[in-house]
């Protein structure tokens, strides 16, 4: 596929239009109708790394497709280069889709791209997507809020955890559901800090990987076990961490076509205990 250095000769023309489209958690059937329509009209598509390859079946055959995804610990396209590509193609009069995992404005750097387009005087739109926050909870089978149990959702980014004791005390005493993006590497430290500042050791924790995608895995444990290092990723895919009493209220959706539990087809639910991170598959 063409890379950022292969498109510099595109001539300047009348401004095109840029759609910053949320693709959802990674599988094509969770993109919105508006996002799909933007894709169908696209002449240039810049897409993320966390999308299932089958997304490319939705791309117009005539579109210039450029992979610009970022993965932790791997070589990737700089954000400044993505901005340059958006400006370059929009100034050339093309319809551009920036296809982003999840929602563009939830840890997706969509705000940075929107500001770059606005500063350049180029027309654009933001098409919301199904956030991994919502997809992870739905796929694993638990509510983010639950009457008389959780009336608050707190969202963190796992690469940069709070630095003050006051912030940790607030999190430990929030009484709601805590969701941590990109938190698999800092999960043990996160759990330890919450325990240190008053959270209950038996507070339920879930690690959801590849949410709503083939191979989804949901691993359930407790804060104490997570702090001891027992809760570890089961895959190399993206993961979200959920902590809170609402996780006790688990449910088991079924596939309409088979009336079987979704987990039996698209993923698994596991329990991580204190025995060295051992996981056991649970029915349903």
Image: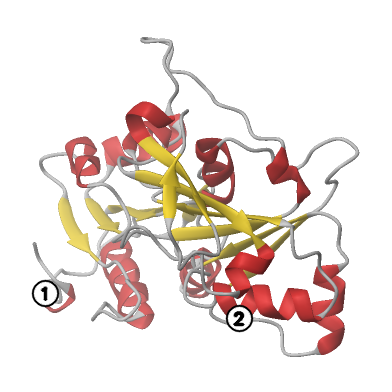
Indicate the secondary structure of the residue bearing disc 1: loop
Q: Read off the residue under disc 1.
A: 9
Work out which quarter of the rendered image holds the N terminus and state it: bottom left
Is residue 62 or residue 178 the one in the foreground?
178
Q: Residue at x 52, y 42 (%)?
A: 135
* Left or right of residue 30, residue 227 in this image: right
Residue 53, x across and y down, in percent: 20, 47
Q: Residue at x 72, y 90 (%)?
A: 163
Among all residues in the image, which is located at the extreme front? 275
Q: Read off the residue under disc 2.
A: 189
Is residue 275 or residue 137 the one in the foreground?
275
Mark 2 is surrounded, within 10 Å at the Cα level, by few (under 14), some (14 to 19) or many (20 or more) other residues, namely: some
Among all residues in the image, which is located at the extreme bottom? 164
Of the image marks 1 and 2, the number of the one nearer the N terminus: 1
* Left or right of residue 31, residue 45 in this image: left
State the separation of the CA atoms marked 1 and 2. Answer: 48 Å
Figure quadrant of residue 101: bottom left
Residue 144, x across and y down, in percent: 70, 44
Is residue 247 or residue 223 the one in the foreground?
223
Q: Residue at x 28, y 61 (%)?
A: 49
Q: Answer whether residue 23 is visible to the viewer in this image.
A: no
């Amino acid at each position: 596929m063409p890379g950022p250095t292969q498109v510099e000769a595109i001539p300047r023309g009348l401004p095109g239009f840029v759609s910053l489209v949320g693709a959802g958690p990674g599988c094509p059937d969770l993109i919105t109708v508006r996002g799909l329509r933007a894709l169908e009209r696209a002449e240039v598509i810049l897409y993320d790394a966390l999308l299932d390859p089958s997304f490319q079946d939705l791309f117009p055959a005539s579109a210039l497709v450029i992979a610009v995804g970022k993965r932790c610990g791997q070589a990737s396209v700089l954000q400044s280069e993505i901005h340059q590509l958006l400006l370059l193609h929009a100034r050339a009069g093309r319809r551009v889709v920036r296809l982003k995992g999840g929602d563009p404005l939830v840890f997706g750097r969509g705000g940075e791209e929107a500001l770059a387009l606005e500063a350049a005087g180029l027309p654009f739109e933001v098409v919301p997507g199904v956030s991994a926050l919502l997809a992870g909870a739905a796929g694993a089978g638990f509510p983010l809020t639950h009457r008389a149990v959780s009336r608050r959702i707190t969202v963190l980014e796992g690469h940069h955890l709070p630095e003050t004791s006051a912030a940790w005390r607030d999190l430990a005493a929030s009484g709601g559901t805590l969701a941590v993006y990109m938190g698999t590497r800092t999960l043990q430290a996160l759990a330890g800090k919450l325990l240190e500042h008053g959270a209950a050791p038996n507070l339920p924790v879930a690690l959801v990987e590849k949410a709503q995608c083939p191979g989804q895995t949901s691993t359930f444990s407790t804060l104490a076990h997570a702090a001891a290092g027992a809760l570890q990723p089961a895959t190399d895919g993206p993961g979200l961490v959920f902590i809170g009493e609402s996780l006790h209220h688990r449910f088991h959706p079924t596939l309409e076509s088979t009336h079987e539990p979704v987990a039996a087809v698209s993923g698994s639910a596991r329990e991580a205990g204190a025995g060295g991170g051992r996981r056991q598959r649970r029915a349903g």
